[in-house]
Image: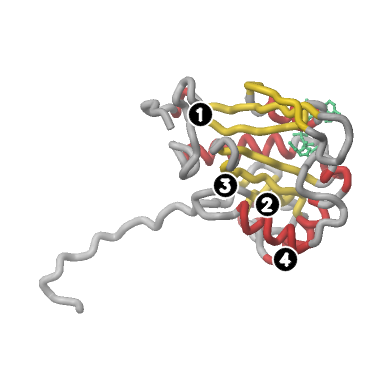
Amino acid sequence: MFSPKSPPSIPRDPPPPSHPIIQTPRLLLRSPIAEDIEAIHLIRTNPKVAEWHNSTNSTTPVSDTEAWLTRIFVPRKTFSFVIQLLFSATPESSIGGSGPIIGVLNMTINPKTSFSTIGYFIAPEYWSQGYVTEAISASLFEYWELYPDGLSGSKRDGENGRAHVDATVIAKNMGSVRVLQKCGFKLVSYEEVEDWHGGPNIVLDRYRFWKPDSLVDSPRTG
Ligand SMILES: CC(C)(COP(=O)(O)OP(=O)(O)OC[C@H]1O[C@@H](n2cnc3c(N)ncnc32)[C@H](O)[C@@H]1OP(=O)(O)O)[C@@H](O)C(=O)NCCC(=O)NCCS
C-alpha cells in the first residue's frame, strides 16, 4: 500500500529489447510477425536455399518453420532477425514494412559447442547484391553493444578468452564463404562430415569473428 513516507520511486529506463529493430541503408532487420511466416517458409524451403541446410527440404511443412522461428527468437538467448527490404528512403515510413521479406539472419547458441553461431539465407532473386553482408555487419555492431559478453550462456574462445561469433559453412558454398570473409570472419577449423542429402562426404568450415579490439573488456575464460 502506498504510504506518504515511502521514498519517491526512481524512474528507470526500460531494458533494451533483446531483438532490436535495425535499419541499414537498404534493409530493415526486425522480429517476425505472424504475417511473415508464409514468406519465410517459401524462402527457407526453396530448393536453392535448402540445398545448403541440413534441416529443410521442399517438403518441410510450414509448422516446422513456425517452430523454428520460435526457437531462434528466444529473448536474450538468441539474436535473430527477419530481413526486410526497404523501399522507402524515409526510415519512419518504412518501419512496419513496405518492402518484401527477403530472408532471415539468426544467431543462436550451438548446443554442441556452446558458441554463439550465426546462420542466414535470402531468396535466390536477391543473391549477390550485398544484402547479407549488409545485414551481418549491421547486426554484429548492435550485438556487441547489446551483449558485450555475448549471448547469455555462450562460451568464449578457449585460447584468448575473447567473446566471438561463429559460422559453420559448407566449404564449397562460395557465396556464403565470401560473405563471411567480407564481414571479417576468419577460418579457424574444418571437419569432414556425411552429406545431409546422401551424397559424398562434405567439408564443413568453421569461421570466427572475435569481438573487435576497440570493444574488448577484461578477458575471462568461459
Ligand atoms: C549465401 C547467401 C546468404 C549470400 O547472400 P548474398 O546477399 O547473396 O551475399 P552478398 O551479396 O552479401 O555476398 C555474396 C558474395 O559472394 C559472391 N558469390 C556468390 N556466389 C558465388 C560463387 N558461386 N562463387 C564465388 N563467389 C560467389 C558474390 O559475388 C559476393 O561477393 P562480392 O561482393 O565480392 O562480389 C545467399 O546466397 C543464400 O541465401 N544462399 C542459400 C542459403 C545459404 O547458403 N545460406 C548460408 C548457409 S552457411
Do callouts 1 and 2 mark residues in contact (Cβ within 8 Å)? no
Q: Position of residue 31 (x, y in %)?
A: 62, 56
User: What is the tally of numbered marks visible in this picture?
Assistant: 4
| Cα distance in 3D space between marks 1 and 2 | 23 Å
Q: What is the three-letter code of the residue carrying label 4?
A: Glu
| Cα distance in 3D space between marks 4 and 3 | 20 Å
> Please, is residue 144 above or below residue 17 in the view?
above
Residue named by callout 3 = 79
Do callouts 2 and 4 mark residues in contact (Cβ within 8 Å)? no
| First along the sequence among labels 1 and 4 | 4
Quarter of the figure with the N terminus: bottom left
The kind of secondary structure element at disc 2 is strand
| First along the sequence among labels 2 and 4 | 4
The kind of secondary structure element at disc 1 is loop
Q: Residues within 10 Å of mark 3 (few under 14, many from 20)?
A: many
Q: What is the three-letter code of the residue carrying label 1?
A: Lys
| Cα distance in 3D space between marks 1 and 3 | 15 Å
Identify the disc placed on residue 211: 1
Q: Answer with left or right where residue 183 lies relative to residue 15.
A: right
Q: What is the three-letter code of the residue carrying label 3?
A: Phe
Residue named by callout 4 = 35
Q: Which residue is at the front of the view, 24 or 81?
A: 81
The kind of secondary structure element at disc 3 is loop
Q: At 55% across and 55% down in the image, what residue appears?
A: 74
Do callouts 2 and 3 mark residues in contact (Cβ within 8 Å)? no
Residue 116 in view, yes or no: yes
| First along the sequence among labels 4 and 3 | 4
The kind of secondary structure element at disc 4 is helix
> Please, is residue 195 above or below residue 85 in the view?
above
| Cα distance in 3D space between marks 1 and 4 | 35 Å
Do callouts 1 and 3 mark residues in contact (Cβ within 8 Å)? no
Q: Position of residue 108 (x, y in %)?
A: 59, 44
